[in-house]
Amino acid sequence: MKNILVTGGAGFIGSAFVRHMVANYPDYNIVCYDKLTYAGNVDNLLPVSDEENYRFERGDIADRRAVQHVLEQYAIDTIVNFAAESHVDRSILEPDAFIHTDVVGAYILLDEGRKHGIERFCQVSTDEVYGDIEVGHSVEDDRFLPNSPYAASKAGGELMVRAYHVTYGLDTVITRGSNTYGPYQYPEKLVPFFTTEAMDDRPLPLYGDGEQIRDWLHVDDHARGVDCILHFGRPGEAYNLAGENQRHNINVTRRILDLLGKPQSLIRHVPDREGHDRRYAMTAEKARALGWQRQFDFDRGLEATVRWYQENEWWWRKIKTGDYLEYYKRQYAERLASIR
């Protein structure tokens, strides 16, 4: 393992992984490959942009010729695939892009990786492939029951990874991360969305009763988990990277408002989204057995994250314009209007 291609490396979790790998493995060459769609942001990579063991290439994982070129140009021996359309709400509005990137793109990476003789392929997936978990906790051999086009596309990508391992003997590992939060997260997800909206005293459109439960994992712990599985995971195996910290969405929202010193009256309960899973929960025993340990307590991690958005308005204010505003109107304007 010497020349590592990190696809989707300008996104939220991918960029955290790139920053982690560049800082901790100076003998590795880290090549970040990203299409720079709306959620890809080169500002996420500024902390490592001048490092000698880091390179950036713009490209689409569903573009076979572009993938061939980058694999050959940098003599890539390892692929870590973060590239994905990743927002459930957007997948409900426009599922096509999710199938294109999350399934077709994964297939092309696997196929070209096999042809170029890569040593390992790591697929970064999500707890949402398990679907709604009413009781108990998901383990790695549970069946898939995805309930959104996003979750289904991630499950499809995972199944392609399995097929390439079984059929062609490609060395693959899969990680399934739980709900991730932290700095540099595109402000359509709950923590940065509600933090930045509340900073401007705007209403927070909380789906349904807000009693949905998510398992929260700090992005730096997630990045370290992918590192651990990449190096020590058994070929063909999947590993849950669970925060093991379940919280109701409404309680997380209230805590954000408390940290900002904003009134709870900013919360607006709006009509729920279609097919909204009530609860996700996983165990992480397999990953811990390989040596992965979380370092962030959720309460302290959330406080630090909210502070980061307060101190880095330069990063998010320029994002929340143009296309972002059009998406906001499509997703929330009618819901907010319905409760007035």
Image (tube, helix red, strand yellow):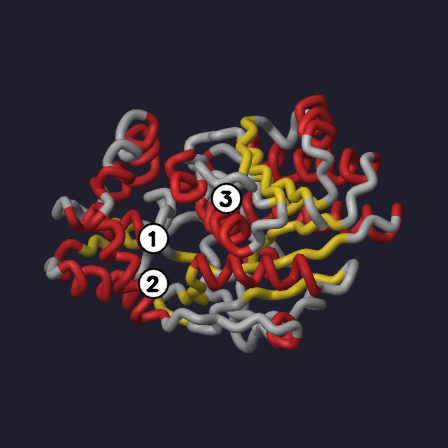
Tell me the residue that label 2 is attached to.
Answer: 249
Q: Are marks 2 and 1 in contact (CB under 8 Å)?
A: yes
Q: Are marks 3 and 2 in contact (CB under 8 Å)?
A: no
Amino acid at circle 2: Asn
Q: Is residue 115 above or below residue 236?
A: above
Circle 1 sits in a helix, a strand or a loop, which is it? helix
Amino acid at circle 3: Ser
Circle 2 sits in a helix, a strand or a loop, which is it? helix
Q: Position of residue 284 (x, y in %)?
A: 58, 72
Q: Position of residue 125 (x, y in %)?
A: 60, 53
Residue 85 visible here = no
* Observer-nearest of 244 and 54: 54
Circle 3 sits in a helix, a strand or a loop, which is it? loop
Q: Is residue 254 above or below residue 13?
A: below
Mark 3 neighbour class, 10 Å CA radius: few under 14, some 14 to 19, many 20 or more? many
Quadrant where the C terminus is found in the figure: top left
- Residue at point 70%, 25% (across, down): 69
